[in-house]
Image (cartoon, grey):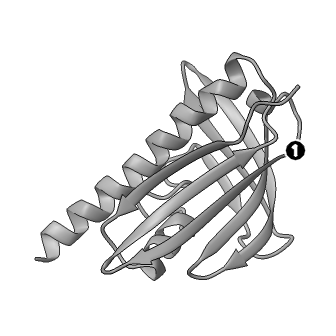
Amino acid sequence: MTLPDITVTRTVPAAAEKVFDVWLDPKSPGGLWFGVDRVILNPVVDGLFYHAVKHEGRTWPHYGRFLRVDRPRLVEFTWVSEGTRGIETLVTVTLEPRGDETEVTLCHSGLADGEMGCKHKDGWSFVLSALAEVLASRRSASS
């Protein structure tokens, strides 16, 4: 049985191009791949990724492949981890310009029910909040 789709939305104080670039750059603070223990990342259609995250005293490997990469509007990739029970799930990130800001919406579908599946909402909320905070601090520093 699967959970309903998890959707998290944040308004980020930066242009969509900047948000997109930070999201896919493992060297950019605030991006999904930044600060992980190990990352292999090829963000092109059919490109693969692997990253290992330390959390709760252990390492959690994540794997997937990119399905769509449309700068600066969309990134879609599969997501496989222990938290998905090894099932390939789908993450879609859309970026909608809102003046000089960007509304980032992340939808994760296909998660198995249970505690591990439900924890993904907290994880994605943390990731989008970190992205917004880093880009807000960059904006303040450049003002």
Depth check: 100 or 25 in front? 100
Q: Residue 33 location in percent, x, y?
A: 56, 55
Task: Report the side of 102 relative to 137 (left or right).
Answer: right
Q: Is residue 49 left or right of residue 122?
A: right
Image quadrant in which you'd find residue 120 = top right
| Residue at figure coordinates x 68%, y 31% from the top left | 60
Question: Closest to the observer: 138 or 120?
Answer: 120
Q: Judge whether 89 appears above or below 120 on screen.
A: below
Q: Position of residue 78 (x, y in %)?
A: 80, 53
Q: Residue at x 14, y 69 (%)?
A: 141
Q: Quadrant of the C terminus?
A: bottom left
Above-or-below relation of 78 to 111: below
Q: Is residue 115 left or right of residue 10?
A: right
Task: Find residue 118 and report its horizontal and vertical position in percent.
Answer: 65, 25
When the figure is inspected, residue 72 is found, relative to residue 139, above or below; the finding is below
Residue on which disc 1 sits = 88
Q: How many marks?
A: 1
Expressed as whole percent of the image width and height from the top left, the position of residue 142 reads 15, 76
Residue with the most extreme left position:
143
Q: Which image quarter: residue 74?
A: bottom right
**Left or right relative to 31: residue 15:** left
Residue at the image position 84 percent from the left and 27 percent from the top? 85
Which residue is found at the position 21% from the left and 61% from the top? 137
> Which quadrant, please, contains the N terminus?
top right
Label 1: how many residues lie within 10 Å, few (<14), some (14-19) or many (20+)? some
In what element is the residue under mark 1?
loop
Give the answer, above or below, for where 101 lies relative to 107: below
Under mark 1, the amino acid is Glu
